[in-house]
Amino acid sequence: MIKFGFNISETRAINLEDCDLENVKKLHREVSSFKLCVSCGACSATCSARQFTDFNIRKIHASFRRGQYAGLQEELKACMLCGKCTLVCPRGVNLRSMIINMRKILLESNKK
Amino acid sequence: MKKIAVIGAGPAGIEAASALALQNMEVLLFEKSSNTLTNILDKAFLFPDFSLANDMVDKLNKKLLHQNITLHVGTEIVDIKQEGHEWKIIDKKGMSYIVAAVLLSTGYTPFDAKRKEELGYGIYNGVLTSLDLEKMIKYNHIENSMGEKPKRIVFLQCVGSRDEKSGNNYCSKICCVTAVKQAIEVKKLLPDTEVYIFYMDLRMWGQSFEEMYRESQEKYDVCYVRGRISEAATTFDKKIQFKAEDTLVGLPLKMNTDLLVLMVGMEASCGTKQLAKKLSIEGDYGFAQSLNIHLQDNETTSKGLFIAGSCKRPMGINETIADARSAALAIMDYVDVNQSNKESLADNN
């Protein structure tokens, strides 16, 4: 076959049909306030880790909710669990507990 | 002539009193403070038409001149009791009045921004509430804490609304459009001042609100940032520095401003909370609860006890006035039916 130097790139769309949302369900069971987020960004605004690294808890939350787990386990390591995000959240999401449980769930599912 | 007591002389109380008086009822209108319309007195303009608040105040106060209305200012009502078909109202001095029906129009009170300590209201001079700014606009005297014209003004939405931490999960619904209105007014007075509005969602629910929002971008260069400000502090040159996330860009944002304006929400007033509790018509967050939001929105579980205006839930002035008229109609119906019941009882005897 002649190689033209082109290749077909994979789709960048989130295909919710193929997403494994089992981890999301697990997280809901552990931290039910998880689903109350309205993406206001108060958590990431106040986050100490966010000021110096790429850690963005609002984005991590959004990716997790859509089953986009790739790289999250590494990103979540930046959090120092200070809990300021939980203090400012207007929706009462228990972010600190959410982060701890995300780490646990991702650790388990990445082991498999 | 049937006597009706109206408690609270804001737009709802005055409009209802006037409607009832025109239908030949005797109205006793009670107001706790020494003045009527205290929540509108310091307003400059009203949304969405930028009409003068003073005009509204004058027009409403003029309605009180009707001979059937007796206005009692500086009179706090401490107790309301049902006695058979009638109601007994008792004021703080111990005076009591017997009436056929009662309308509660005790209104709202602005959220106390000091409760959000992280935003620095009452700590730093450059942090204001929307009410403080409205006064500045009214007297054309917008200054920063150094007495200079501000180069930049930043508005923050949802202070004390949609916030579990303040105990208020509800949306106060008038703040979004008020910020847009005030932003335009600031730009009219100070065209060189930069204006930013930080929001979670912009709820442009009313007629011509969306057009105002568009106009603020198109004509006045108001800049909108989607993100909630999490904390504010002062800098050495007396500016306010705050942190937010620009959630649409996905990056943290730090900014300095001369004035930070907190758009405070509406809470049930002290009088609303006390009386609603006493009368067992307390709804969510201390507001008064109507029987049915669709069909009996002025009636309560007690016959002869009616509610109107922002003692029920956050409301704009136009809605409040419409609601007061509907309450007046409900009261007229009630008094008529009550009257004919009594007459038929008397006939039977």
Image: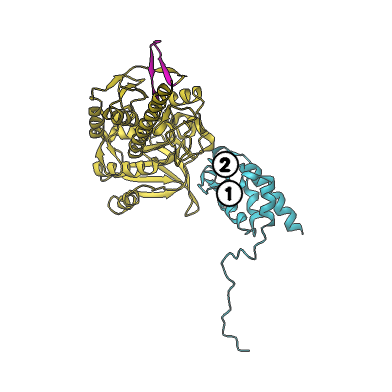
Q: Residue at x 42, y 17 (%)?
A: B88
The residue identified by callout 1 is A57
Gap in angstroms between the C-alphas marked 2 and 1: 9 Å
Residue at horizontal 58 percent and vertical 64 percent from the top? A14
Chain B shown in which color? yellow
Give the crowd class for mark 1: few <14, some 14-19, many >=20 residues within 10 Å: many
Q: Main secondary structure of the magenta part?
A: strand
Mark linked to residue B230 = none
| Residue A80, image quadrant | top right
Query: Tags 2 and 1 in contact by the CB under 8 Å rule?
Result: yes
What crowding class fits label 2: few (fewer than 14 Cα within 10 Å), some (14-19), or many (20 or more)?
Answer: many
For label 1, the SS is helix
Residue A52 visible to the viewer? yes
Residue type (three-letter) at the residue carrying disc 1: Ile
State the residue in front, B46 or B340: B340
Question: What's the magenta region?
Answer: B85-102
Quarter the C terminus of chain B occupies: top left
Left/right placement of residue A112 relative to residue B345 reads right
Q: Colour of chain A?
A: cyan
According to the picture, the residue beneath numbered tag 2 turns out to be: A85
- The residue furthest bottom is A1
Residue at 23% x, 22% y: name it. Answer: B67
Identify the residue at the far top of this view: B94
Q: Quadrant of residue B144?
A: top left
Left or right of B48: which side holds B314?
A: right
